[in-house]
C-alpha cells in the first residue's frame, strides 16, 4: 500500500485576513500633557510656599530701611549669611514677652568679638564700615546702647536694628542661634498702602 500523503505537508497555508489596528485615542497625548503640566504646577507652588514667605513690619526698629506697615518677602532657602544681610528670625529666649519673629541686620558673625565706641561698631577691635546704614535722623540718631566686648559663639549672630537709637536687639538680649533664622529679606513689596518694590 502506498502511504497516504501527510496532510500537513500538502495543505496550502491560507493567510488570515488582516486585523484592523486598535484605534489610538486622540485624547491620550492631550491628557499626558495635562498631567505633566499639573504636576509641574503643584511642584512649583509647593516649592515657592516652602521657599518664600511674606512678613509684615510692625515696629520702627529698622527705620528708614524698613518702615512700619511694609510687607517683605523672605527667602527661606538662602545660603550663607553675611554681615549686612537683613534677616527674619524667631524670637530668642532671652527676649521675654517679645514678638514671635523679629527682623534685624546681621552685624557680628560666629567666632568674632564685637564691641563699640560711641556709635562705631568694632569687630575684633577694629572699626567696621557699614555702607548699608542710611543716614540716621531723629530718634534713630540718638545715642545707642553700648556694646560690651562680646565673643560671638559658633553658630550665632549679633543682630542690630538700623534705627540704632530705638531698636531692641542683640545689645539687650544677646546673640541669635542660626537655627532661629527664618531667612533673608529679599524685597519690599508693599509700602504706604500700595505696591512698592525695592530689592536688597
Image (tube, helix red, strand yellow):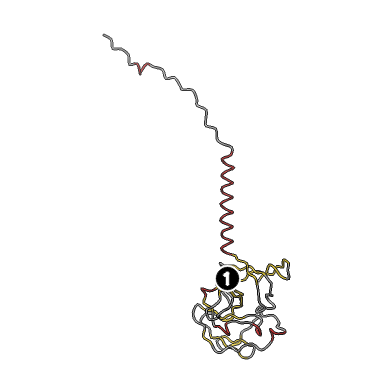
Percent of width and height locating residue 126: 58, 88
Percent of width and height locating residue 139: 70, 85
- Pick the quarter of the image with the N terminus: top left
Instruction: Tell me which corner region of the image, top left, top right, bottom left or bottom right, holds residue 2.
Output: top left
Instruction: Tell me which corner region of the image, top left, top right, bottom left or bottom right, holds residue 130.
Output: bottom right
- Pick the quarter of the image with the C terminus: bottom right
- Looking at the image, which residue sits at the far bottom? 117
On screen, 72 above or below 140?
above
Q: Residues within 10 Å of mark 1 (few under 14, many from 20)?
A: many
- Looking at the image, which residue sits at the far left? 1
Viewer-proximal residue among 83 and 159: 159
Percent of width and height locating residue 29: 57, 41
On screen, 48 above or below 162?
above
Identified at 35% across, 18% down, the residue is 9
Percent of width and height locating residue 146: 60, 89
Instruction: Tell me which corner region of the image, top left, top right, bottom left or bottom right, holds residue 192.
Output: bottom right
- Is 157 placed left or right of 197 in the picture? left
- Total numbered labels placed on residues in the image: 1
Identified at 49% across, 81% down, the residue is 153
For mark 1, what is the residue? 183
- Looking at the image, which residue sits at the far top? 1
- Is 36 placed left or right of 56 in the picture? left
Viewer-proximal residue among 106 and 131: 106
Viewer-proximal residue among 100 and 65: 100
Helix, strand or loop for disc 1: strand
Identified at 61% across, 84% down, the residue is 128
- Looking at the image, which residue sits at the far front? 97
Amino acid at each position: 500500500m502506498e502511504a497516504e500523503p501527510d496532510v500537513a505537508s500538502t495543505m496550502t497555508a491560507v493567510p488570515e485576513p488582516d486585523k484592523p489596528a486598535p484605534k489610538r485615542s486622540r485624547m491620550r497625548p492631550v491628557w499626558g500633557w495635562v498631567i505633566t503640566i499639573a504636576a509641574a504646577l503643584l511642584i512649583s507652588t509647593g516649592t515657592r510656599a516652602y521657599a518664600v514667605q511674606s512678613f509684615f513690619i510692625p515696629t520702627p526698629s529698622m527705620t528708614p530701611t524698613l518702615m512700619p506697615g511694609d510687607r517683605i518677602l523672605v527667602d527661606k532657602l538662602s545660603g550663607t549669611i553675611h554681615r549686612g544681610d537683613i534677616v527674619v528670625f524667631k524670637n530668642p529666649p532671652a527676649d521675654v514677652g517679645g514678638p514671635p519673629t523679629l527682623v534685624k541686620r546681621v552685624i557680628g558673625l560666629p567666632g568674632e568679638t564685637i564691641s563699640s565706641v560711641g556709635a562705631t561698631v568694632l569687630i575684633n577691635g577694629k572699626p567696621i564700615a557699614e555702607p548699608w546704614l542710611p543716614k540716621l535722623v531723629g530718634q534713630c540718631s540718638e545715642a545707642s546702647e553700648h556694646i560690651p566686648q562680646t565673643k560671638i559663639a559658633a553658630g550665632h549672630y549679633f543682630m542690630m536694628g538700623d534705627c540704632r537709637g530705638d531698636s531692641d536687639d542683640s545689645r539687650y538680649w544677646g546673640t541669635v542661634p542660626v537655627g532661629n533664622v527664618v531667612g533673608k529679606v529679599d524685597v519690599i513689596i508693599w509700602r504706604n498702602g500700595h505696591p512698592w518694590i525695592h530689592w536688597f
